[in-house]
């Protein structure tokens, strides 16, 4: 083979590998990707409405968050881990009794990448069963731990009738201080946005969610003053339901 032609082939092959890698990275973590299963990341832009969501709960501090939301009559969607629901069933029920929606956030909050389809489906199924057993709510919405989707997830979602939910804005409230969380969310909010915060820290008992609580305490009135209305993910995506 001509040396120049050989180099061209190598360059083309390398470019192909890079393109494939970039596509896989987007499919796994891209907020607008639906490659591995049906997913939404925002609602319609024609209404001044946002959805506040919380991941990783329930935790011992979730009741404090419920008090804040009740103060402003704000509904939210809580993506709960089955393991945490089993550990704190009364807190999980309190979320439901307060009028909030509960979504599936897997059972043990694993990273799905490189896991087989049987493991992924078992995680979703066990979370569904645990949440329903303790709260009488069977989730319709699912958020993957760490926002990471993988092969086999779509089949599991179809079997369990779950729709994936990513986010428009994530607050990084597990590592940022309240000031930074409020600035990040309030600075990027727009009609139809799905906001992602956390009322737990994976499976840790008694997690410190002080930054989250303070951010919510300050963020909710700011957005209300800007004319935003809060709805659950379900009402945001399907306003006529």
Image (cartoon, grey):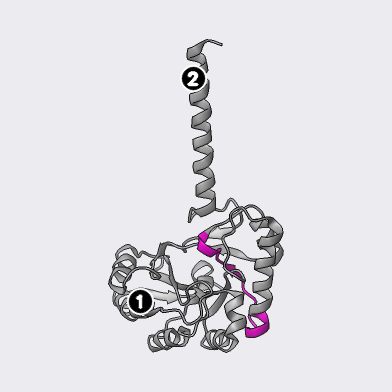
Image point 56% across, 11% down: which residue? 1
Please state if 55 lies on the left or on the right of 118 as rendered: left
Residue 142 in magenta?
yes
Instruction: Give the CA distance from mark 2 to mark 1.
Output: 53 Å
**Residue 178 drawn in magenta:** no
Which quadrant of the view contains residue 85? Answer: bottom right
Label 1: how many Cα within 10 Å (few below 14, some 14–19, many 20+)? many
- Provide the residue span drawn in magenta: 132-147
Q: Position of residue 25 (x, y in %)?
A: 51, 48
Q: Residue placed farthest to the front in the image?
A: 205
Q: Which residue is mark 2?
A: 8
Secondary structure beneath dot 2 equals helix
Where, by quadrant of the figure, is residue 212 drawn? bottom left
Mark 2 Cα shell of 10 Å, populated few (<14), some (14-19), many (≥20): few
User: Which residue: 35% across, 76% down?
Assistant: 211
Across and down, in percent, residue 237 comes to 51, 67
138, 191: nearer the viewer: 138
Q: Is residue 161 visible?
A: no
Asked if residue 4 is positioned above or below residue 82 in the image, the reply reads: above
Give residue 49's position: percent from left, percent from top. Answer: 41, 71
Mark 2 or 1, nearer chain start:
2
Instruction: Report if residue 59 is visible in the image.
Output: yes
Relative depth, front residue between 38 and 227: 38
Please say if 223 is above or below 91.
above
**What number is the disc on residue 211?**
1
Element carrying mark 1: helix
Residue 222 percent location from the top left of the image: 29, 76
């Amino acid at each position: 083979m001509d040396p120049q032609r050989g180099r061209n082939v190598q360059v083309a092959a390398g470019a192909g590998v890079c393109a494939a890698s970039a596509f896989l990275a987007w499919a796994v973590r891209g907020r607008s990707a639906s490659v591995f299963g049906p997913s939404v990341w925002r609602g319609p832009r024609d209404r001044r409405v946002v959805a506040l969501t919380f991941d990783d709960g329930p935790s011992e501090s979730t009741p404090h968050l419920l008090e804040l939301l009740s103060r402003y009559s704000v509904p939210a969607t809580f993506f709960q881990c089955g393991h945490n629901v089993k550990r704190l069933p009364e807190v999980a029920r309190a979320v439901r009794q307060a009028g909030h929606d509960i979504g599936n956030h897997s059972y043990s909050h694993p990273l799905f990448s490189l896991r087989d389809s049987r493991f992924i489906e078992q995680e979703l199924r066990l979370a569904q069963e645990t949440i329903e057993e303790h709260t009488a709510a069977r989730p319709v919405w699912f958020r993957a731990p760490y926002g990471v989707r993988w092969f086999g997830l779509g089949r599991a979602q179809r079997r369990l009738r779950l729709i994936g939910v990513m986010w428009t804005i994530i607050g990084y409230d597990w590592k940022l201080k309240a000031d930074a969380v409020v600035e990040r969310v309030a600075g990027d909010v727009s009609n139809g946005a799905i906001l992602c915060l956390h009322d737990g820290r994976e499976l840790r008992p008694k997690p410190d969610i002080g930054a989250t609580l303070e951010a919510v305490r300050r963020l909710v009135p700011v957005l209300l003053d800007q004319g935003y209305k809060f709805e659950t993910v379900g009402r945001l995506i399907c306003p006529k339901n």
